[in-house]
Image (cartoon, rainbow, N blue to C red):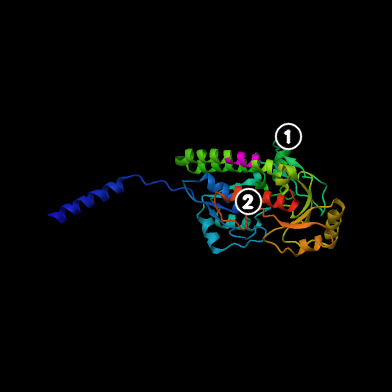
Amino acid sequence: MRLTALSAILTAALAATASLPALAEAPKVVVSIKPIHSLVASVMHGVGEPTLLVRGGASPHSYTMKPSDAKALSAADLVVWVGPELEGFLEKPLQANAPKATRLTLMDLKSLTLLQAREGGAWEPHDHGHEHHGHDGHDHKDHAQDDQDHGDHDELNSHVWLDPANARAIVTATADALAAKDPADAEAYRTNADRTLQALDALDAELKATLAPLKDKPFVVFHDAYQYFEARYDLSAVGSITVSPDRRPSAKRLSAIRAKIAGLNAACVFSEPQFEPTLVRTVVEGTKAKTGVLDPEGADLPEGESLYPTLMRNLAASLRGCLGA
């Protein structure tokens, strides 16, 4: 009798469970690089976890897709990436492995400030290329020209996340894309986005105060990755050692950089953790410049929500430490 009663109770419980509506699954989101993944993870907090492709200290400039990456792409509902100018390795896999996934290409966002990549080894101080969709007094262009500029990314600097104003635009666009994919959790995405935007505003104010003493201190970077950070905080980078991390600079370029360091008494030359620092030692040899390390992508940081603010604070700390403020 007892077994019969227990069996009846279990059968009834299973039937009741089967009749309940299935819980909606969070969208499967794939993100290319760590700083963008951090912002997306903040928007998805409590709902789901995005998948990161370029992990650890790997660089998107030289990344090779793994079978696990292809599998993640094939299951993706949404892919968030900067664009082909940064993650060239993703162009063909997006077509082959994720043809039905929604693609959020950040370089196409009209709400972003975009800067042109700088040419040559030595720049004029405060040369931040040509700006589009300006914030805080930056130049605005008409919409027809905006469309033209956003259609041609070849000459644009793609390290857009290094301006917190751009990070705000990325967070808002991500929340919109997720809400469209997952209306049931739209309120959660909006709430998370609002919280993240407030944190970004506080971070921006903190960085402005931290970096204010560095305004007129010239320095040289490894490659032109920091232009958005420089423009936002009025910093004085005067040149880069190489145009792209995967290209060795010419002797002429190295000579121009050395002359710039000597002529402007540049205080510091920065390498990056993913790349061989030999070139940095070459250009500072015989000068008074010190060397430091800047990490634009969080190579040595654990992935997750806290990566973005930590990355930005680390950049400010490295600049202050090497430039002597």
- x and y percentages locating residue 7 in the rendered image: 19, 54
Look at the image and give the residue range highlighted in magenta.
199-205
Q: Main secondary structure of the magenta part?
A: helix
Q: Nearer the viewer, residue 107 or 276?
A: 276
Q: Is residue 203 magenta?
A: yes
Instruction: Give neighbour class at mark 1: few <14, some 14-19, many 20+ (Cα, 10 Å).
Output: few
Marks 2, 1: nearer the viewer: 2
- The mark that comes first in sequence, 2 or 1, is 1
- x and y percentages locating residue 168 in the rendered image: 61, 41
* Kind of residue at badge 1: Gly
Q: Which residue is mark 1?
A: 137
Kindly state the secondary structure of the residue where label 2 is placed.
Answer: helix
**Image position of 251 with respect to 201: above or below:** below
Task: Give the CA separation, mark 2 to mark 1.
Answer: 26 Å
Image point (54%, 41%), residue name: 175
Instruction: Give neighbour class at mark 2: few <14, some 14-19, many 20+ (Cα, 10 Å).
Output: many
Image point (72%, 37%), residue name: 144
Farthest residue, direction left: 1
Kindly state the secondary structure of the residue where label 1 is placed.
Answer: loop
Q: Which residue is mark 2?
A: 311
